[in-house]
Amino acid sequence: MIQISSSLSNENDVISHGYPILPRSIDLAAYEYVFSTSGQLRRAYGVTILVTVIGTVLSLSVTLMFAFALSQDQMPGAKIMMIMVVITMLFNGGLVPTYYVCVHADLPYQGYTARVDCPRTHDECFQSGPGKELFQEQHSSGVNGSSKN
């Protein structure tokens, strides 16, 4: 409500009286400015959408590769890596401490932390899963390039 009211208020009223709940006088200068620079606004939204799509695809790819590697029984160090992922997920400092550290250390603040959410947290998933049997079946049917006659 305050954001809409402030955007409809006169700039001098906001400076002298603060952010109002109801505007003293309606001024559409902010909206005129935004729509007069529509090319810049379209370009900014285009960059936002592009970064979101690329970031989502990359994040999903890395997460899937890491989860696949952790699902394999023969992967060395899988339990240690899983412990590191779970500890990172449980003891994340949060948004405010991350922002504070990045601002005071002159680091670029991304607004998120890199982490891998792994669905294999239930004890049953560690004991048995479709991965081993699936790969044995693929191997015996010749999916991996080797045929068993």
Image: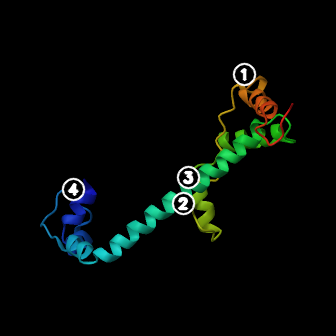
Q: Name the residue under label 4.
A: 21
Q: Mark 3 points at which residue?
A: 95
Nearest the viewer among 115 and 27 is 115
Mark closer to the observer (1, 2):
2
Residue 4: quadrant of the picture: bottom left
Mark closer to the observer (2, 4):
2
Q: Is residue 93 above or below residue 138?
A: below
| Percent position of residue 88, x then y | 70, 44
Q: What residue type is labelled 4?
A: Ile
Nearest the viewer among 143 and 95 is 143
Mark closer to the observer (3, 1):
1
From the viewer's perspective, is 29 left or right of 119? left
Determine which of the numbered discs, if any, sits on residue 124 in the image: 1
The residue at the far front in this view is 149
Query: Sequence-wise, which precedes: disc 1 or disc 4?
Result: 4
Q: Residue at x 77, y 26 (%)?
A: 133
Query: Sequence-wise, which precedes: disc 3 or disc 1?
Result: 3
Q: What element carries label 2?
A: helix
Determine which of the numbered discs, if any, sits on residue 54 in the image: 2
In space, the residues marked 2 and 4 are separated at their CA atoms by 39 Å
Mark 1 and 4 residues: CB-CB less than 8 Å, in contact?
Answer: no
Q: Which amino acid does label 2 sit on?
A: Ile
| Percent position of residue 47, x then y | 45, 68
In space, the residues marked 2 and 3 are separated at their CA atoms by 22 Å
Q: Residue at x 26, y 72 (%)?
A: 34
Q: Residues within 10 Å of mark 1 (few under 14, many from 20)?
A: few
Q: What element carries label 3?
A: helix
Mark 4 and 3 residues: CB-CB less than 8 Å, in contact?
Answer: no
Q: Which amino acid does label 3 sit on?
A: Leu
Q: What residue type is labelled 1?
A: Glu
Mark 1 and 2 residues: CB-CB less than 8 Å, in contact?
Answer: no
Q: Residues within 10 Å of mark 3 (few under 14, many from 20)?
A: few
